[in-house]
Amino acid sequence: MLLVDDVMDVVGALTAAGLEVRSDAGTRAMYATDASLYRIPPLAVVRPRSVDEVAAALTVARETGVPLTSRGAGTSVAGNAVGRGIVLDFSRHLNRVLSVDPEARTAVVEPGTVHAVLQKAVAPHGVRFGPDPSTHPRCTIGGMIGNNACGSRSLAYGRTSDNVAALRFLTAAGDSVATGYDATGRPTVSGGDAVLAGVRDVMGHHLATARTELDRFGRQVSGYAAQHLLPERFDLTQALVGSEGTLGVITEATVKLVTDAPVRVVVVLGFDDIVAAGEASPAVVTHGPTSCEGLDSRLLSVLRARRGEGAVPPLPEGAAWLFVELAGDDADEVRGRAERLAAAGLGVDALVVPDPATQARLWRIREDGAGMAGRSPVDRPAWPGWEDAAVPPHMLGSYLARFDELVTSYGMTSAPFGHFGDGCMHVRLDYPLDRPDGTQVLRAFLTDAAKLVGEYGGSLSGEHGDGRARSELLPHMYSAQAIAMFAGIKHAFDPTNLLNPGVLVDPDPVDADVRYAGSFPIELTGRRTRLAMAYPHDDGDLAQAVHRCTGVGKCRADNAAAGGVMCPSYLATREEKDSTRGRARVLQDVVRGELAWSAPEVHDAMDLCLSCKGCASDCPTGIDMATYKSEVLHQTYRRRLRPRSHYSLGRLPMWSQLAGRVPRLANLMMRLPLLGALALWLAGVDRRRTVPAFARRPFRRSYAGPSPAAAGGRPVILWVDSFSDSFDPEVAAATVRVLEAAGYAPRLPDERLCCGLTWITTGQLDAAKKILGRTVASLAVAARDGVPIVGLEPSCTGVLRSDALELVPGPDADVVAASVRTLAELLAETPSYQPPDLSGTTVVAQPHCHHHAVMGWAADAALLASTGALVSRVSGCCGLAGNFGVEIGHYEVSVAVAEQQLLPALDAAPDSVVLADGFSCRTQVADLRERPSLHLAQLLDPARS
């Protein structure tokens, strides 16, 4: 173990070399794990800006004897991208596409280049990079090279090793080596002569082993690809792909590009069970698909439970399915092949899907598989470790049956999915890691699983690499001679074991450094720390809640194309600490007792969280960072002095109620230059923000009940929030007119009520419980009478639908949550309602983040479509997000978030109606573009001519 002085020496040497170094507790927590089961805090994180800086970091590692680990997006599932020494994060700066050669169909990239960025760069030339793993929106090319990633279309495009044309890398000794191919296709290599001589010597002793034990089927990627080091081929490019950063540090890659067939049709085949799907896969492959992906009904059950029945498009009958993609140049030919496959009788039912939009929904389910599988079929935490085994495809059905038996024998559950056409199965398992013997069970199961795959002549890994999860188990797959060969190769490249030690050769134990094992210090003296939130989906356990984050990193991707919101702060800063994953990693150290609630690193990570709740719906693991942020603020400031904005913005409904008594005076005071500026500073509000004016007459003071014509209508409670009441009463008035036209008799609650939203977002949860508890108790009376409750402000509506179940759980909260509707939802349930004809009206719609995440915007989309309006929906967050965007220190990020989607959409349609139900969204539009915007009720208002 390195002493503190030694640690400081290493960090000092890295800093002296002019490197961008991070060694604070927050950064070490964020980089302590990837998407795997393992947690190993690094000594320091270096973010190199050039190849020279990579070499400098390597020199420091070599001179100090501190190991070095290369890291891309941190989505490695086997523990390949964590290490105890220096972690090189290539994704921050070395992330460029350096050149594209359309004629040669190649591109030169830096190792931190994101797969999706490469695809965007080469798409104008009509080509693409072939392999497409499910993490393609955020994984890096360097990471794909490290693991030899494949993806769902490997039947057409092969593995990453089949798509790399040249590499540049540094050896552990610091030598620069370049590999590639000459004009005849013969492998070439320059540099690293001493290393190459050592490798050739090793291979001379293991010729028979390399020729007989490796490359037996397409997905055999475990161990080193030593077959490429045989004297008859000696292809160092292919040999390095899949070496998991243990043989060299990749600094540049030339990748091959392919053309995409213009016509795609998906055939979904249904089967009685996953075993039958596996057995049918070889027959499916004879139809020439580009993809053949398996999916178990147990996984879809998790998806439906989290996102509702509408999350899954119609599927053919069955309890397991194969998603089969056929592609080609001729539409009739491809459709004919699809019809023949559907009629081949390979399952119990079949569905041909020619529609690209529906295809995209199907593939999105498959891509989110790893995240969704983070909860088991019995709603327990589920983990990787044995998530990537592969067997020869003709043996997959039998293997799946035996594997299911093995899982059941350990009292665990699973929901398999994967690349069935290649014989590769992905799965997450609910290991009992919370038990004292949890890691012992983990070791026993992994050992038995490795033996089982060995019986089938399979591979421990089909594309994720062996990492820390499986390297120790390689002797169950390979002979002692093969293990010795791997060790010899490693020693020739890296004699001092400097590069990513603990992986592949001299491996760490599979049950060491497991990040979610045993109890956590947050459980003190047998009694859980007093948490404010109930965490009902995690058994009341905050540790389980924050460990929902498995590291798949979807929060590091731009999810706008799929209508997503997550994660606006990361997209604005591109800093790991500002991603949902980075925050979750820091909170995992809080529940471990490594960091205090009040630690600066914790609050630095939480500061730019907009509490948008985008992750609650967009993250496939179901994490809810907005709730966790509220908990952090509550635990930090409870009974302590708070930031100024907590007293002002955090209690805005209270202040607005007071201002509502003298609105003209309040508005005048805010307009006076000195007094207004002082008030903003005292409130913690950025001076560049425009403060909305208080309404001259709040809605509650003017509303006398339904009109005489509507008095006999169906009763409905109009939930008029503080924002609509105090700042925008016309929204409430318009809602009344729409509801009356739909046959309702709207009435207000008998007393003035508040949902406590601003108290919740600022972590004043003791007060929020009292405020919300009183509201829920009052509304529950009407809810039990079957009276619907319609909300105006999406964030406040979301509190009643979601946060109330966390803060004041019980029968009252349950019945209220079930009775609350958005305006569009209520109108959708009203058969007699006829929306106005808005043909010829173009609308730019900005759904509120909480609307998207908690209630969903499907009812609004359907209602708008029925009006005939031409609607362009904006993805992403507006950037204001309640109190976030007006607070001092947040203005730049707030604007940067708006610039991602909202502002470009507004600028592209200057004459369109802007639709924004959220008060903060309307405020942001007015503040940054000085444009009016409407609530849905105002758009549908019968009084609007």
Image (cartoon, rainbow, N blue to C red):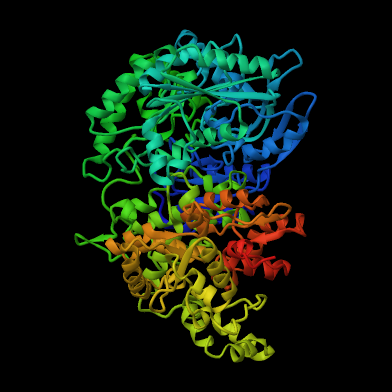
Residue beneath the point at 56% across and 41% down: 72
- 186 w.r.t. 6: above or below: above
**Nearer to me, 241 or 664:** 664
Classify residue 288 by image quadrant. Answer: top right
Q: Is residue 201 visible?
A: yes
- 431 w.r.t. 156: above or below: below
- 936 w.r.t. 459: above or below: below
Residue 867 at x, y percent in the picture: 63, 52
Residue beneath the point at 61% across and 30% down: 355
Left or right position of 753 against 52: left
**Nearer to me, 704 or 580:** 704
Residue 791 at x, y percent in the picture: 48, 65
Classify residue 900 by image quadrant. Answer: bottom right
Classify residue 174 by image quadrant. Answer: top right
Left or right position of 524 against 564: left
Residue beneath the point at 60% across and 54% down: 876
- 845 w.r.t. 504: above or below: below
Residue 564 at x, y percent in the picture: 56, 49
**Nearer to me, 53 or 433:** 433
Left or right position of 273 against 338: left
Number of labels in the image equals 0
- Residue found at the far left of this picture: 526
**Nearer to me, 586 or 303:** 303
Q: Looking at the rendering, in which quadrant would you find the C terminus?
A: bottom right
Residue beneath the point at 29% across and 40% down: 378
Q: Is residue 215 visible?
A: no
Residue 808 at x, y percent in the picture: 32, 66
